[in-house]
Amino acid sequence: MLSDKLLSLLGALSKPERNRLRKFVHSPYLNDQDDVSRLFDVLDATLRKSPDKALSLDKPTIWKALYPSRTYDDAHLRRLMSDLTQLTQRFLVAEMRAQDPLGEALDLQRALERFDLPKHMAATERTIDHLIEEHPGKSVEYHYAQYRRHWNIFARASKQVATAGFSEKLIAADFHLECFYLAQKLKLYIDWLLFRGFRASEHELPVIPGFWDYLNDPRFDEAPLIRIFQKIITCFAEIENETHFEQLVRLLDHKDSQLARADLRECYFIAQNYCALKINQGNTPYYYRYFELIKNMVERDLLIENNQIPEAVFKNFITVSLGAGQYEWTERFIRQYADYLPARIRENARTFNLAYVYFYQKNYDRVIECLRDVEYSDVVYALGAKSILLRTYYEMEEHLALDSLIESFRVFLLRNKVISKNLKREYMNFISLVKKLSTLAPSDKKALERLRQRVSQTSYAMPKNWLMKKLAEIETGRRR
């Protein structure tokens, strides 16, 4: 079999990217091995014609395409594949560098130091100043670029006769290096706090003595990201003091124009994490705070990244918006933004989440219309759809349809080889609880209490709140 490492790398590139890679591979400056170029052409042609066929290519077939009259040499072919893999990786680095004109200009500033070309240097530094001025917000990368700019100028001056004013470049370089370090350190600390909030950790993230006090130096007011990261850390360190969260939201509103889009987006996601923690603690009013953050992200066009929305973000937004009672807004959101989901799950996600909205709206006929005849290719959506349909039949008191779905759901779980044992057990328990609910007599107090105890032990991965609500309805006689 051919190198999976090479094929997976080439297969991950889009056709336009492979077009550019062809030029890269065929450049004599970058690659002086004609055999490597021909190997690329053979693999690229196969990938374009049939990606599946490319995966089944074997070494002798490739060798014959490259050398029709030569005896097969495995070591030689492996070396060619290794060289093409390395060349493709160099191409990926070059592609990334091409998207960073400021980084390229700073490298050129450093490279020109070797020559006595004052006009070229002046033009390059004007370009750097322009790119820094146009940089979208005072991000970590912004401070690092400022550090490099000032340091390059100071380093050049230090090799010459002392020049007035160049010591200021050293001070500026030092300031921006500090901003870069502090902002990056705070970001790492936030990541650690978030990790610790969801998983046990034996490790502490160390900080140097006096670090927290040093941050309060007024000089760092010029770095809004440092102040926002400070407030985020305070929010999670003193999670019960909700004043910190209010101050964070106001700070994001006030400083949004000074932040890079990626930083503002990340800060909103972190603020949403705070809301999620409060909701998990039973503080349900935070559904509304979470929803306001979602609206702010949508209104500021922060949701779409690289022309896509991550599936988990999409699902979280819908769950929270429904929890906040924003049914019409949620339906509009699904119809407007589902097209930005990854193609493989797009239709599943659209149909499932619309059905979820209709369920919250108690529009049960439309839930059935969405879900009854849909075959889900993704097992997660299949489980979710069957769960919603089960609750819908219960709400409509469609007992025959409910019994039939319970049985078919049970068989689906038993036969499916993808679902984990733990998840199967949870869904089997959920099916059993719904079955018990549908046959429970309000007068049977002992059975009601036993069922309540079973529901209380149910994971929140299941619709636990809905089960509790249905139990309360039976107990108070509001059902049947």
Image (spheres, rainbow, N blue to C red):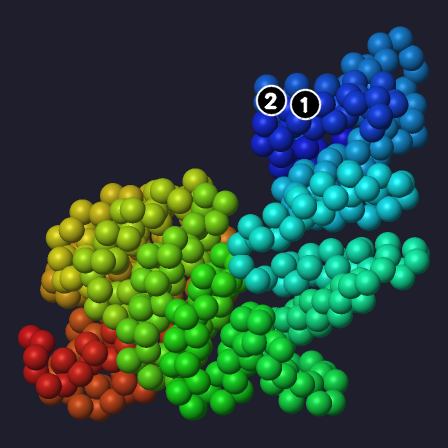
Q: Residue furthest front?
A: 164
- Residue 403 visible here: no
Q: Quadrant of residue 360?
A: bottom left
Residue closest to the eye, 303 or 42: 303
Residue closest to the eye, 193 or 268: 268
What SS does tag 1 mark?
helix
* Disc number placed over residue 44 in the picture, else none: 1
Q: Position of residue 252 (x, y in %)?
A: 43, 70
User: Eyeballing the image, is 34 above or below 442?
Assistant: above
Label 1: few (<14), some or many (≥20) within 10 Å? many
Q: Residue at x 86, y 46 (%)?
A: 113
In this rendering, would 56 be left or right of 112?
Answer: left
Q: Position of residue 137 (x, y in %)?
A: 53, 59
User: Eyeballing the image, is 76 above or below 71?
Assistant: below
How much space separates mark 1 and mark 2, taking CA atoms? 6 Å
Residue type of the residue flagged with mark 2: Arg
User: Eyeballing the image, is 322 above or below 349?
Assistant: below
Where does label 2 land, which residue?
48
Q: Residue at x 91, y 26 (%)?
A: 76
Q: How many marks?
A: 2
Residue type of the residue flagged with mark 1: Asp
Tell me the quadrant of the picture where the C terminus can be found: bottom left
